[in-house]
Amino acid sequence: MDKIKYLRLNLSLRKSLVLYLVVFVILAIILCTATISICNNTVNMIQASYPPSGEKYYLTNEQGERLGDGAYIGNTPVIFSEEDERTIALLELLPLIAAPVYSALCMIAAVLLFYKNKLKKPLTELRAASEKISSNDLSFSIEYSSKDELGQLCHSFEIMRTALANNFSEMWRQVEERKQLNAAFAHDLRTPLTVLKGYNEMLQTNEDKQTREIAATMEKHISRMETYVSSMSSLRRMEDTQPEYKVIPLQPFLSSLYESAKIVCTQNGKELFLQNRILLSQLSLDHTFISQVCNNLISNAVRYAQTAVTLSFTLHDNGLLLSISDNGKGFDKNSLQRAANPYFTEESNHSEHFGLGLYICRLLCEHHNGYLKIENTSNGALVSAYFKSPVL
């Protein structure tokens, strides 16, 4: 029995389907034959229940004695009752209907049984596995031991899952090593920078004019290095931070974001337009994350806008979609793909901007289960930040 079960489990899908169809076709033939036989027997029983009509003749011997029961000779038809006539007509029609009905039912049964025994379990395993992978969950295994085509697919899927898990583990290990290296680098740079800063202050008091000029140039580079080290430390904290969700009243919060953005735009001589399409009163969000992203995006937009910046709020997929556009030149083709990478900037002067603004925005959005989308419009650039609210 176990051997038969093993062979059935490992039989290919094509052979399994043919086997199921052949078995159920044979079953349909048996059912049709049985139905025909039962109908014929029933008709014969009904006909036998009526006495024969016509003249009865007997065989006799030489003495004139009757031999046997005799036989009716004549063509007088038997008259059946209306109920028996309907029954006989139905029994004669039933075999004609039984063949296609039994065939259809057996085909459906064969397909359903084939799906249940050969397709249902592996398809369920593969669907569950794909859902877990899409949720970044690789802590599972696919358990389907058949050697048929779907079994081979499940095995390949399991190999892929294992490879992904190993790659993710290696990637996270490298990310952690990079974080530790950056932190150590930033920490170790602070002491020599402090020493250089002290010597630079001494050189700036020198009576020689050329020495003071050199010291002034050194001060600019030392200041830039201090800013760079500070940005590395801030970036490490941003990569590790997680949102703290709180139910906040939306309209007052959005108004505060607009007021802050308006101040920045006014100071830089740019006009700010507001588009608030949210009617919801409250939502569970991390207002610190959203405020920081909004401030960074407004600062970027103000820097590249010609005359105007537009701030837009929309409710999207149980979350807040914050969009900021400007009427500047937009991103070039190369920058559009790399704008959110760390330390990438289009500006040649890195003394103030190290290219971390959009990268930090992307980090905060992703930690908030959202995304950052960067694109160009016909009038300039558009950056959309989405913050998903957790399901309560």
Image: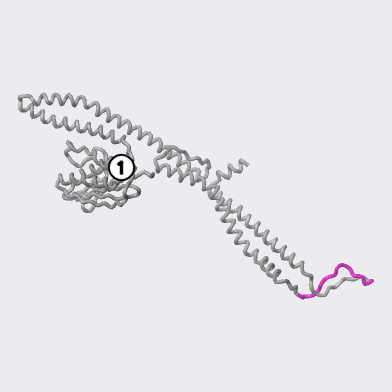
The N terminus is located in which quarter?
Answer: top right
Quadrant the C terminus occupies: top left
Query: In the orientation shown, which residue stands out farthest toward the right?
Result: 63
Q: Nearer the viewer, residue 357 or 276?
A: 276
Reply yes or no: does residue 70 show up in magenta: yes
Query: Residue at 5% of width from left, 24% of height from top?
Result: 207
Query: Residue 62 in the image: x percent, y percent?
Result: 93, 71
Above/below status of 67 relative to 359: below
Report the residue at 29% width, 42% height from top. Answer: 287
Q: Is residue 84 left or right of residue 180?
A: right
Tell me the crowding category of disc 1: few under 14, some 14 to 19, or many 20 or more residues within 10 angstroms, Cα based.
Answer: many
Residue at image coords 57%, 52%: 18
Q: In this rendered view, identify the residue nearer to me: 87 or 40.
A: 87
Q: Is 322 one of the magenta-colored residues?
A: no
User: Which SS class for mark 1?
Assistant: helix
Q: Is residue 168 above or below residue 58?
A: above
x then y, percent, for residue 19: 58, 50
- Left or right? Give the position of 26 relative to 237: right
Q: Residue at x 11, y 31 (%)?
A: 217
Across and down, in percent, residue 39 comes to 69, 63
Residue 229 in the image, given as x and y percentages of width and height: 22, 31
Q: How is the image coloured?
A: one colour
Q: How many marks?
A: 1
Query: Is 154 in front, or is 143?
Result: 143
Residue type marked 1? Cys
Q: Which residue is mark 1?
A: 365
Q: Quadrant of residue 48?
A: bottom right
- What span is in magenta? 63-76
